[in-house]
Every structure is written in C-alpha cells, then in structure tokens.
Image: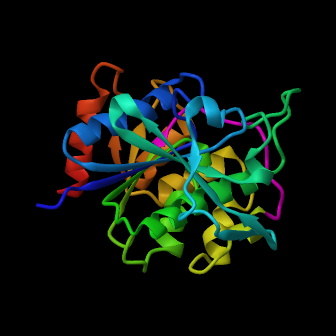
Amino acid sequence: MEKKKILFISQAITPYLPSTEMSNISRYLPQAIQEKGKEVRVFTPRFGVINDRRNQLHEVIRLSGMNLIIDGNDHSLIIKVASIQSARMQVYFIDNEEYFKRRFVFEDGDGNFFADNDERMIFFCRGAIETVKKLRWTPDIIHCHGWMSSLVPLLIKKSYKHDPLFSEAKVIYSIYKDKFDYTFDETFGKNLITEGIRPREVKAISTPNFMNLSKSAIKNSDAIIQGNEEINEELAEYVKEKKKMFLGYQNPEEYIKSYSDFYDKILS
C-alpha cells in the first residue's frame, strides 16, 4: 500500500523561530507522523531572522526561479531547504528578497505591523503550493498552522481544485491565539483573485483582518484543530456553525497520538 502523504504548512517552526505551542507542534508533529509510516513535507517562510549559515539552509536551484505576480509585480520565488538531522526530516523555506530579507518577522523594531504582510502571506501560500507542484508530490492531507497559512484552504479548494495533485486533498486548519490587530489594504481582494477564485469568493474577506481571514480558512477547510488551550470564542462558535470535523485542544503529552488518529479518521 502506498504511503499516505501529509503536507505541513506553518508560519513558525522551532528551532528556526522561538519556541511556542505552534512552533513546537510544527517541529515535532511531522517527525512523529513520519515515524508512524507516512510521508511528509514541511514548508515555512524564510524570515530574515533565520540565519542561513547557522541553520545550514541552502538554495534548491531546481525548485527556485519561478515568479509570482502580486499587485501587478513579479516576485522571484526562492526555495531553500534545511535538514533536521535528528528527525531525518527536511524543511522547505519560502524566500524572496523583498518580502523576507528584513530582520524581523511580522513587526518592525518599533512594534509596527508590516503593511505588506498581506502580500507576504499571499506569496508564502502560493509559493508553498507551487513548489509542491514542482515536486510533483500529491498530498492526502494539507495541515495549515497559523494565520499566515490561512489562504491555503481557499486556494486549494478554489484555484487548485481541478489540479490532480490537489483535487482529492483534505485540508486541516489549526486555530491558534495568534491574533493581530490590523486591517489590510483594500487591494487585498484584487491581489487574491486568480484563476478559480472569483470576486464572490473573496467577498467574505472584503475587510481583510484576522477574524475574516480565519473564518475563510475555517469555511474552506475539511477539518479544524484547536491548537491552543484558549482560542477566540467567535471563531470557536463559527467552527460549530459550519459543522466541521473538529479536534479539540490536546495537551503536549498526548497530542501526537490524537492528531495521528484524527488524520486516519479523515482519510478513512
């Protein structure tokens, strides 16, 4: 029997970014799922705080070189990879000089939220999916972690729904308490509209803020996982309203088995 394939797309993975519940799950869950006999791929942004030399990142020339058009401009997609030797696992990094060279993650040195985080999010989500296409790798499950991955469910279910690599994929979105208080520019919807995504699909996020992006991710996912013990109450109610398959919060000692069983349930 062919191994089931799980694609992890996360905005934060330890040790490349500081330890949090999200970054720890994104690091140790793929390893455990791989050890249980499934095939995994892991994608994350290559933020400027991640040192290439220290973390032994190197560019994958055969995967780099594609341009993604955002707001009418070409942006070069650079793919880097690093190996976590103890896990025998590779992590793919989505990089771009304009979006990810700065030595910060989401805010500048004065704590100001970057106004182009919306473009960085679109670039990351599309870049991860396009790289998986280049790899010609067909995921059975796509598990997204963090708001920066929140466009993946919409893209998979609308823009890539007829692509044979993704047409049968089940999408899981993990909800964390990673809220930001910022509303993106009105050009967000225009930048998001691509083949398969029509204006009505982005109407729900015509006010592009954390809450509406999260609701879009929930609506377009097949299942939801509560990643933190406490999450936004409005989002918790929205999950119930949409009647999604749901896995509640799992403590750090037990989450791996629970997540693995949840994957098997979704694939059955």
Residue 229 image position (x, y, % from top left): 45, 24
Left or right of residue 256, residue 196 in this image: right
Taking the image as shown, residue 146 lies to the left or right of residue 42, namely: right
Please name whichever residue, 20 or 249, is drawn nearer the observer in this view of the structure.
20
Residue closest to the eye, 232 or 123: 123
Residue 157, position in %: x, y? 46, 69
Q: Position of residue 17 (x, y in %)?
A: 60, 29
Is residue 175 shown in magenta?
Answer: yes
Q: Is residue 114 above or below residue 242?
A: above
Relative height, residue 12 to residue 153 (above, below): above
In the image: residue 99, left or right of residue 220: right
| Observer-nearest of 99 and 83 | 83
**Which residue is depicted at the point 62% across and 47% down?**
148
For the C terminus, the image quarter is bottom left
Query: Is there any visible trace of residue 209 in the rendered image?
Result: yes
Farthest residue in the top direction? 253
Q: Residue at the right extreme? A: 110
Residue at image position (35%, 28%) is 86
Magenta stretch, residue numbers: 174-187
Horizontal side, residue 52 vs residue 255: left or right: right
Q: Dividing the image into 4 quarters, which one contains the N terminus? A: bottom left
Q: Is residue 248 visible?
A: no
Characterize the magenta stretch by its predominant secondary structure: loop
Q: Position of residue 82 (x, y in %)?
A: 50, 41
Above/below status of 178 relative to 44: above
